[in-house]
Image: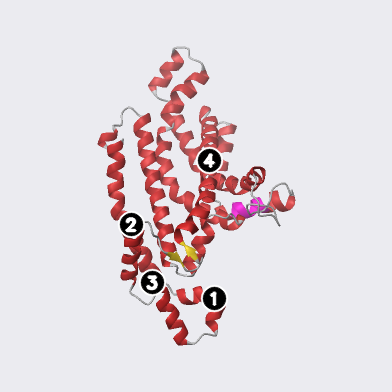
Amino acid sequence: MARLTARRALYAVPVLLVVTFGVFAVAAASPFDPVKGYAGTAALGADQETLDRLRENLGVDRPFTARWWDWLTSALGGDFGHSSVMRQPVAEVIGERLVWSTLLCAVAFAAAVLLGTVLGVLAARRPGSLVDRAVTSAAYVLEAAPVFWIALLAVWLFALQLDVLPAGGLTDTGSDQVTFGGLLQHLVLPAGVLAVSQLPWFTLYVRQGVGDALAEDPVRGARARGLSERTVLLGHALRSGLLPVLTLIGSRVPELITGALLVETVFSWPGIASATVEAATAVDFPLLAALTTLATAAVLAGNLLADLLYGLIDPRVKLEEM
């Protein structure tokens, strides 16, 4: 396990280098002017000399390769630079928002995996039954639905029509104090919407995996020995049927991150979504590079976690050979 982790970490280095270099290259080719994004409406009345001086102070008058190298060498020392759009160090921007994004993604992902497993098992027990058709039909519909559409529908239903949950934010209007009860209440809608957006894949994968496992000879043999249906389903078929789901965990991380950005925007959740949008529109090179590096590292970590879980659960897979 340690060898696999070390090898993957070594492979991640060139990936992160290419990704950060690409961020600076794409940002440099962007039509957005970072100086005007930094100055805001004040840039409309400023003369060219003032704009050029501001451009020099921000360091955006230099080639993007030089800016990338300066950022990279500083980042290796723990200094991710200063965000021009947020007016604070990049590390502080990410530190203040990462905990809320992590909480949202963790709760949503756990709910999607657990609920998807339950629904997948229920559908796989009797293929072609009413429950199977209902679960798979709902999964295909949700799979095609955009996450922002689900979020807007949830706001309309639960916040505007039923008035049982807040429409967004982290605290109630007029309050800056975060309480445990208030946090749970404000977390329900964004986490629920994000979980629903990930639910179809886990449901369909579990249904397929458990359905295939129920048709295998070992499971048939367990039934022939007189074991209860619950023991056969949970003790034999489910364990074998969950193996394909482990690979799905890593592949769903990019979609989870993308969905979280949209969900945070709709629900005004104080995560990294607002920082990402503002950094992109203002061409904030240091913040863009740090956020992209963080997202890339999360994807690589998800793939590593999937491989480790697969190797630990499936005795046929040897970690040292991966």
Q: Earlier in the sequence, mark 2 or mark 3?
A: 3
Q: Residues within 10 Å of mark 1 (few under 14, many from 20)?
A: few
Give me the disc on residue 76: 2
User: How many residues crowd around disc 3 within 10 Å: few (fewer than 14), some, or many (20 or more)?
Assistant: some
Segment colored magenta: 149-155
Label 1 belongs to which residue?
Answer: 40
Mark 4 = which residue?
112
- Mark 3 or 4, closer to the camera: 3
Q: Is residue 151 magenta?
A: yes
The residues tagged by marks 3 and 4 sit, at their Cα atoms, a distance apart of: 38 Å
Q: Where, quadrant-wise, is the C terminus in this rendering?
A: top left
Per the image, the residue denoted by label 3 is 28
Determine whether, in the image, residue 10 is placed left or right of residue 58. left
Query: What label does residue 198 carry, if any?
Result: none
Whole-angstrom CA distance, mark 1 to mark 4, is 41 Å
For label 3, the SS is helix
- Dot 2 falls on a residue whose secondary structure is helix
Query: Could you say whether the residue bearing mark 4 is in a helix, strand or loop?
Result: helix
Q: Is residue 200 magenta?
A: no
**Furthest-left residue in view?**
321
Percent coordinates x, y for residue 70 in the rendering = 33, 66
The amino acid type found where label 1 is placed reads: Gly
Residue positioned 54% across, 54% down in the render: 271
Q: Earlier in the sequence, mark 2 or mark 4?
A: 2
User: Is the magenta region chiefly helix, strand or loop?
Assistant: helix
Coordinates of residue 54 in the picture (x, y in percent)? 45, 79
- Ranked by sequence position, the earlier of labels 1 and 3 is 3
